Structures are given as structure tokens and as C-alpha cells.
Image (tube, grey):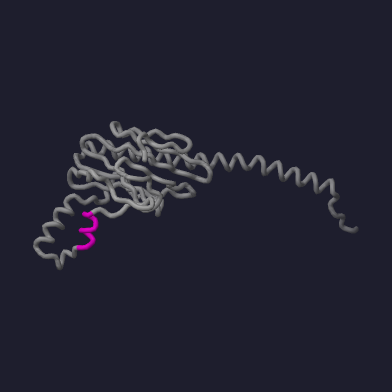
Amino acid sequence: MRARGMTLIEIGIAMAIAAGLLAMAIPAISNVTRVQLRQKSGQLGSGVRSLYGATALAGHSCRLVLDLDKQAYWSECAEGAVRLDRAGEQSAGGSRRDSREEELLASIRPETANEEEQVKLALAQKSAFKASGDIPKTDLGGSVRFLDVWVQHQSERYTTGKAFLYFWPSGLTEVAAIHLGQGDDVNTLLISPLSGRVRIVSGRVDAEGQR
């Protein structure tokens, strides 16, 4: 018995079935994407709220580190209260520059430092931030990414490097807008400085007063 090939009608029916299955699959994939973005946004928002409360209870300054290159975030705290430079951070091309204290810590070697340098080093280390257990290093994971971050003390939004959201023991944080994206979908996390409340908005929204 000779094998029979498919007729044009049969091929047309098969293509119609395949197209129908694909049409049903695309919305399902899109829904999974939105669930992942919503989950990661909620997780980061919960971290901001918990660090706000932990800082006020502990009585020292903390910050949330947002690593836009490695797509991860974690918390760091100093021994006591830390003040930011009124001039704000120096930045260029959407990336933060090291502060004077960070440059000092990087340039002085304790084993060869003279007496004056040792004093400067001790003062710099006292106000230095170190990783804390409040928020362990967390990778965004999957295809969810930081698109950009703007925090009140920044002169521009950052798209590379690290951004810092500071929390003070007086119960204050900073106005900030964090944009997370996955594919064409974007979520905005808006932080309130007085309450640490995080509002998650679908789409790209700037914070009040953002530059």
C-alpha cells in the first residue's frame, strides 16, 4: 500500500489548529510574566518597609543597596547615625561616583599608614556601612531587571552602578522611584519619606520632585 501525502485541506486544518494553540499560549505566557514582575516588586517593597522599621528600632543609620549591574539588592548599616553631604552625590552618565570617604578607605593601607592617616581611617570606618542581616543579598532573578533608580539625594536617575536608599533612626527615609521591568512590562515603586510606605504602580511613573 502506497503512503499518501497530506492534501491542501488537511495542511490548512493543521495550520489553523497550530495558530489557535499559539493564540491561547501567548496570553498565558504574558500572565506568567506579569506574575513574576508583581512578585519581585512586592518582595522589594516588603524589604523597604522592613528596613524602615528595623532602622528606627536599632537607632543607627542603614541603607538599601540597589546594584543595577548585578541586578541584586541588600541592606547595609553603620555603627551610629550618618549624615549625607548636603551637596548630594556626584554622578556622571547615569552612574554614581565614589564619595570622599570611600576614596579615602580605598587609598590608605592600614599597615603603612602614618598617624594622621590612621586617625582619618578610623573616622571613616566609624561611619562606614557594612552588610547587615536585615535584608540578605537578593537577586532579582529571571528576566526581571532594574531599569533605573532615582533617590532624593541623587542629581540624576541611575541606570548603572549602585544606588543607595538611606534610612535614619529618626524614622525617615528618602523620596525614591525604582523602576523594575520585564519585557515590555514596567512597575514603579514609589517610596514615601515620612512613613516608609511603598506604592507599587503599573507603568513608568516619576517621584514627586524627581529630576
Q: Residue at the spot x=31%, y=40% of the render?
A: 152
Identity of the residue drawn at 41% across and 46% down: 148
32 vs 1, left or right, is: left
**Residue at the outermost right position:** 1
Q: Does 101 appear in magenta? A: yes
The quarter of the displayed image where residue 166 is located: top left
Position of residue 40 relative to residue 125, above or below, is: above
- Left or right, residue 204 beside residue 134: right
Quadrant hosting residue 149: top left
Q: Quadrant of the image for the C terminus? A: top left
Q: Quadrant of the N terminus?
A: bottom right
From the viewer's perspective, is 40 left or right of 7?
Answer: left
Picture coordinates of residue 11 (x, y %)?
A: 80, 48
Residue 210 location in percent, x, y?
36, 38
110 in magenta: no
Please determine whether, in this image, residue 193 is positioned above or below residue 76: above
Residue 69, picture quadrant: bottom left
The percent position of residue 199, horizontal first and vertical second, equals: 39, 33
Secondary structure mostly taken by the magenta-highlighted segment of the chain = helix
Outermost residue toward the left in this view: 115
User: Residue shown at 58%/43% (left/top)?
Assistant: 29
In the rendered structure, which segment of residues is drawn in magenta? 100-107
- Give the residue displayed 30% in from the left and 46% down from the top: 75
Question: Is 23 or 81 nearer to us in this picture?
Answer: 81
Q: Position of residue 16 (x, y in %)?
A: 75, 43
Depth check: 30 or 157 in front? 157
